[in-house]
Image (spheres, rainbow, N blue to C red):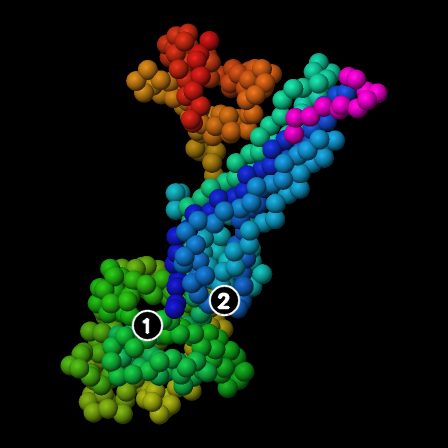
Amino acid sequence: MFVDEVLIKVEAGRGGDGCLAFRREKYIPMGGPFGGNGGRGSNIKFVVDEGLHTLIDLRYMKVIKGDKGENGSGKNQNGSNAEDVIIKVPQGTIITDTDTNLILADLKNKNDEVIVAYGGRGGRGNTAFKTQSNPAPNFAENGEPGETRQLKVELKLLADVGLVGMPSVGKSTIISMISRAKPKIAAYHFTTLTPNLGVVKEKKGRSFVVADLPGLIEGASNGEGLGDRFLKHIERTRVIAHVIDMSGFEGRNPYDDYVTIREELKQFNENLLKRPEIIIANKMDMDSAKDNLEEFKKKVKDVEIYPITAITNEGLEEVVTKLADLLDEIPAEPLYEEEQFESFVLYKFKKEEPFTITKEGEIWIVKGKEVERLLQMTRFGTEEATARFANKLRKMGIDQKLIEMGIEEGDIVRILDFEFEFK
């Protein structure tokens, strides 16, 4: 089964907890802090595997979770980091964060890899908090939660030339003749249910990849037929080859077919019309094909037309040479603008408040990435840990903001699922 798009959730591993421990040896009655740090949680990493050609392995993986880092322990022993979770995907895979619609990575090269969610850092043991003013801290941190993302994982085939056209015009026959690809061929519509890739070697030794893209009919860009599933695969191609049934089989008009396909390409991505293109006029051995070709040439004058009969291999050598010549002249262009990638987004224009405060009924709700992270990493169990948490909130300005907004002593403040009285 050919699967080229999946939606998954990834949860990187939580960091291991820091250890709260003190030296308790016979001849050291006042031993100091002795707790080690926790280890880092698993990162979630995507890696290109050249042996894969579909995303079927991810189809049933709705949630992928990383492992927690090892907890720290006594005697200042740090916990070990958790191993990264490796997700293997085909070359040509694009990973997008569905919450921001920004691209995390376009894995189009053989050795590409990317970390899409980072594991949380390990919590610090009490040894890490030792200072001159507090030589025996009685608190330690919990591990930091790992990143969580909702992702769209999409495969866009890596091909130099895309064969486009109505069903049953001979695309599969052409690719079977010019390459070693063995597509399913039959005399009915939508025989081809998956894109076929073939490596073509031209007589001078030049080689390139051709994709036979199925499912294009009128309305394909809006989901008619199979077009909405496969139009995206043409975005990477450098040359578009229109395959036209010049015989007018089934009463179709060759020129109308050509106009229809170009309109679908335009509706899907207007930039596709700027790509170099040629027209392959197929089935020239059929009755009325020559007359139809003459009429076609009167209406289409700015695109080179190559008459062929694919089933007998007539005229295909000239087509292959032309495609190789075009590819020599055309540099590979980037598929996306830099602004579409998360790594290029300029956050300096998007100044966000470190926290927000709202009131729901009688409860004050505090939200914010840093304050929520502080809560999750605080291990409430000692007065010292609680005092440290309260002091951090004051330094962030939360107490002052609550007072400005009219909070009164004894009111309830909530951060995530944690509630406390304001004093």
Q: Nearer the viewer, residue 225 or 294?
A: 225
Q: Which mark is residue 193?
A: 1
User: In x, y percent, where is residue 300?
Assistant: 26, 75
Looking at the magenta stretch, what is its main secondary structure? loop
Residue found at x 58% / y 33%: 143
202 up-or-down from 368: above or below: below
Question: How far, Cα to Cα, is label 1 from label 2?
Answer: 18 Å
Neighbours of disc 2 within 10 Å: few (<14), some (14-19), many (20+): few
Residue 102 visible: no
Residue 1 visible: yes
Q: Which mark is residue 52?
A: 2
Classify residue 383 by image quadrant. top right
Q: Nearer the viewer, residue 338 or 420?
A: 420
283 up-or-down from 97: above or below: below
Q: Of all residues shown, which one is farthest toward the left? A: 251
Residue found at x 56% / y 25%: 379
User: In x, y percent, where is residue 290?
Assistant: 23, 89
Q: Of all residues shown, which one is farthest toward the right? A: 27
SS type, badge 1: loop
Q: Is residue 398 magenta?
A: no
Tally of numbered discs: 2
Which image quadrant: the N terminus? bottom left
Neighbours of disc 1 within 10 Å: few (<14), some (14-19), many (20+): some
User: In x, y percent, where is residue 57?
Assistant: 45, 61
SS type, badge 2: loop
Classify residue 140 by image quadrant. top right
Part of the protein shown in magenta: 19-30
Residue found at x 43% / y 20%: 419
Tell me: 106 left or right of 39: left
